[in-house]
Amino acid sequence: MLFPDAIFCAYIMAVGFVFAGMSASLHQLVTGRPLRFECAGYGFAVVFAVLVRVFAGPAILMRNAIKGALLGRPPYWLALSAIIASLWSFFSGIIMLELLVRAGLFA
């Protein structure tokens, strides 16, 4: 039964991509500028900034990869970035679904 497992893995990956996009979009809505991997600040702000970037990483990575492809970077960079972002969003999706299950939102 490989097919149901593949669908479940794709669902987990989609949850990770959606949460990454929502995190990046919320940051852009609040600050007015797109989220980047660099972060500056002090104290608790740095911890929160790193946490946001950990979950929004696939969205940032794909945005940068698509911009690079439009600027003439070789296509294998886009493919490699897509693979990395997919794995990253898969693991982020596992964490998010586990948090939702533990919170009692899913039975």
Image (tube, helix red, strand yellow):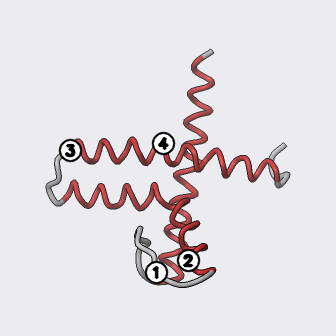
Badge 1 vs badge 4, beta-carbon distance below 8 Å: no
Label 2, label 3: how many angstroms apart (C-alpha)?
34 Å
Q: Mark 1 points at which residue?
A: 40
Image side of residue 98 versus residue 86, left or right: right
- Name which residue lies at 55% across and 77% down: 46
- Name which residue lies at 41% across and 45% down: 84
Is disc 1 placed on a helix, strand or loop? Answer: loop
Disc number placed over residue 75 in the picture, else none:
3
Disc number placed over residue 87 in the picture, else none:
4
- Name which residue lies at 51% across and 78% down: 29
Disc number placed over residue 2 in the picture, else none:
none
Label 3, label 1: how many angstroms apart (C-alpha)?
32 Å
Q: Where in the figure is residue 73, as x and y percent of width and height?
A: 17, 53
Q: Where in the figure is residue 35, as x and y percent of width and height?
A: 44, 72
Is disc 4 placed on a helix, strand or loop? Answer: helix
> Tag 3: residue type?
Pro
Q: Name the residue under label 2.
A: 46
Along the polypeptide, which appears first: circle 3 or circle 4? 3
Say which of marks 1 and 4 sits in front.
1
Image side of residue 77 versus residue 90, left or right: left
Q: Look at the picture and state if 73 lies above or below 43.
A: above
Label 3, label 4: how many angstroms apart (C-alpha)?
19 Å
Q: Where in the figure is residue 56, as x and y percent of width and height?
A: 51, 61
Label 2, label 4: how many angstroms apart (C-alpha)?
25 Å
Along the polypeptide, which appears first: circle 2 or circle 3? 2
Label 1, label 4: how many angstroms apart (C-alpha)?
27 Å
> Tag 1: residue type?
Ala
Q: Residues within 10 Å of mark 3 (few under 14, many from 20)?
A: some
